[in-house]
Image: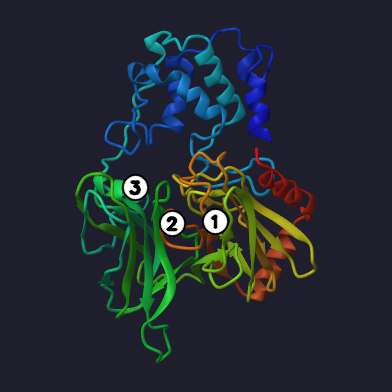
Amino acid sequence: MRTLALAACLAFSGCVVGAELTNSNPPTFARDIAPIFQEKCQNCHRNGSMAPMSLVTYEETRPWAKSIKERVVTRNMPPWHLDKTVGIQHFQNDMSLADDQIALIARWVDGGAPLGDPKDMPPPKQWPNDDGWQLEKQFGKPDFILKSEPYTMPAKGQDVWWRPLTPIPVTEARWVRAVEMRPASLAGRRITHHALAYLEQEEPGSNSGLAMQGLLMEWAMNKNYDIYRPNTGKLLVPGGRIFWEMHLHAVGEEIRDHVELAVYLYPKDEVPKYRTFLMPFPATPGNAGFGQLDIPPNQIVQTEGYTVLHSPARLENFQPHMHLRGKAMLLEAILPDGTKRTLSFVDHFNFNWMTNYIYADDAAPVLPKGTIIHVVAWHDNTASNRNNPDPNQWVGWGDRTVDEMAHAWVNVTYISEADYQEWLSKHGPPPPTVAAAAAAAAAAADGN
């Protein structure tokens, strides 16, 4: 695969990847590497943030040089685990390194990781205070912040699922244009595997009472916010509430924390045309991903699920969700005429990074009514999976980290048939990609 080819290429001195390697000047930290780290790494790798080391100054970075090379050449860092050879490749939040950036970092390390001229260092990047919200720069202060009841996680013990309720403070129907979610403290991030904020409210115009209307937001490491595209949003109505589900685990010390959800509303007089729903598309038989999983010891297992779109729709993102045995996941559209389109393929899933791949505006797939969303998952329950706690155990579906899941979180915006036909007249049908899907499946199924 591409990762292995790049790694092999870099192992030989004659390899040339990208324009940077044609430069006879050896790369230096100050001139060449620091700008890459500012753009792609320091959001996490700085003092007070979530990463275990800072990569801001040369003195902080130099001891980690060889490890940095290994992590970027194998494409484990930054945490962008998408296969770049198949499917959609344009994203709003693409944090991946280009091939020439990877080659430049490797060349810098192989050349002794020199500092270079300190005068070449770019000005330090100014980061927002971690106490603030990332979306404030774009939307201003949140309209309101919802807070779950706190929970005290003991130093040792079994995993806990904490499910309190929080009322939503609206007195009239309001539309949401963005949400941002987080544990309230850095310590809280250590004990929170993920946190879900389900929207529980009565559908407008019905008398059915409170009912679940899907997720308003999920927090997981590397997934912090959702911004809905222009003229789309989620609807809040009076009397609704958030049904929280927080998966907490012990980390060796007692920690008490809660989860916060910042809500950014459209102005009162602005009503978006489309309503967006966060849906779990299953990669197993059964309902909403909570289906059958049968993963024998010492095997790589493939499962798949199918969901039919009841109306034309735009898919806004792709976020695979599996646990420790998760290996790869494919998102595919089977159109009503039988043609197939590979949307996205994560070929080296990493449980520690629940990365959300948000499609760019001009790349988000728009699909007709009757399209089948086909999700395929691969789980690696062998000793070659370094994250596997015990390859000799049978694994089934369950909430615990040592159990497994297999679904893709996707924000779905349903549109009218007339709007779909208008979109189709401008863009035309996408080409089928059966061969690409088959190649993805073969790559995931092999044990390498």
Q: Mark 3 Cα within 10 Å, few/some/many (few <14, many 20+)?
A: some
Q: Position of residue 106 (x, y in %)?
A: 55, 19
Q: Are marks 1 and 3 in contact (CB under 8 Å)?
A: no
Which of the two labelled residues, at mark 2 and mark 1, occupies the earlier sequence position? 2
Identity of the residue furthest to the bottom in this view: 207
Residue 226: which numbered mark, if any? 2
* Viewer-side residue, 192 vs 209: 192
Q: Does residue 25 appear in the picture of this structure?
A: yes
Q: Amino acid at mark 1?
A: Asn
Q: Position of residue 286 (x, y in %)?
A: 58, 72
Q: Which residue is mark 1?
A: 317
The correct choice, above or below, for 135 with respect to 106 in the image is below
The correct choice, above or below, for 91 with respect to 234 in the image is above
Q: Amino acid at mark 3?
A: Gln
Q: Does residue 17 appear in the picture of this structure?
A: no
Q: Are marks 3 and 2 in contact (CB under 8 Å)?
A: no
Q: CA distance from mark 2 to mark 1?
A: 10 Å
